[in-house]
Amino acid sequence: MVSKVKLIDNILPKEINNNILGQLFNSRNWGIAYDKPDFIERMILDNQPNEGFNILSYDNVKNIKLNTPLNIYADTILYKVKEILEIDFLEPSRYYWNYYDNSATTHFHTDESKDYITILYNLHNNDGGTEIKINNKTKFYKSIESQALIFPSHFHHRGIVPKENKHRLNLNIIARIKKSYK
């Protein structure tokens, strides 16, 4: 069974990350992110904080393939991770571009089953990050620019919103794999 979290630094240069941020800031495809189906009731009717925002630029199951350079950047990150870790991907499943301001709240969730991996790519440095639960222990991984955090998609995890910084943007890639990665 897969049980490891891996980190890869310096996936893309800062200038490319800045280009991606420019694409995201100019996009009109943002939606409200949510992990639980009662989000409208909690957010609007109960006056609760948002859970962040996202752009779904690619989803193999829902047949969503936006015509955007964002997918080229996501493909580049995915295949760089594949090359470095020598993971045998069958296909990318989805690309989520996430935005959290420091008023958002998050919840633990899983992205997919054991046949998938999650790649969280940080677009800039900030004091937010990701918490991952493994064997009832939680570990925090701070957002470091150009770093990819790779783990099995069935691991419980959540984004951590920044406190000092006002914003956090990252990419969440889900990809189906042929066999477990170590």
Image (cartoon, grey):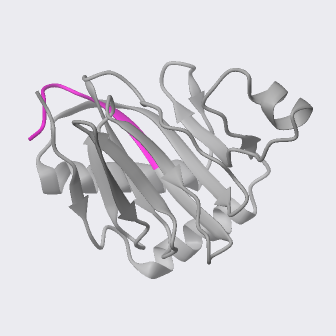
Residue 60 in the image, given as x and y percentages of width and height: 48, 25
Q: Residue at x 12, y 37 (%)?
A: 181
The residue lying toward the viewer, choosing from 181 and 77, is 181
Most distant residue in the right direction: 45
Say whether residue 124 is left or right of residue 164. Answer: left
Specify the quadrant that holds the C terminus: top left
Task: Classify the position of the N terminus by image quarter.
Answer: top left
Q: Which residues are magenta?
A: 172-182
Residue 181 among those drawn in magenta: yes
Q: Residue at x 43, y 31 (%)?
A: 111
In this orientation, which residue lies closer to the viewer: 168 or 63? 168
| Label total for image | 0
Instruction: Point out residue 135 in the picture as x, y percentages from the top left corner.
Output: 21, 36
Could you tell me residue 175's position as x and y percent? Answer: 34, 34
Q: Is residue 115 above or below residue 120?
A: above
Q: Residue at x 50, y 41 (%)?
A: 95
Residue at position x 68%, y 20% from top?
37
Q: Is residue 98 magenta?
A: no
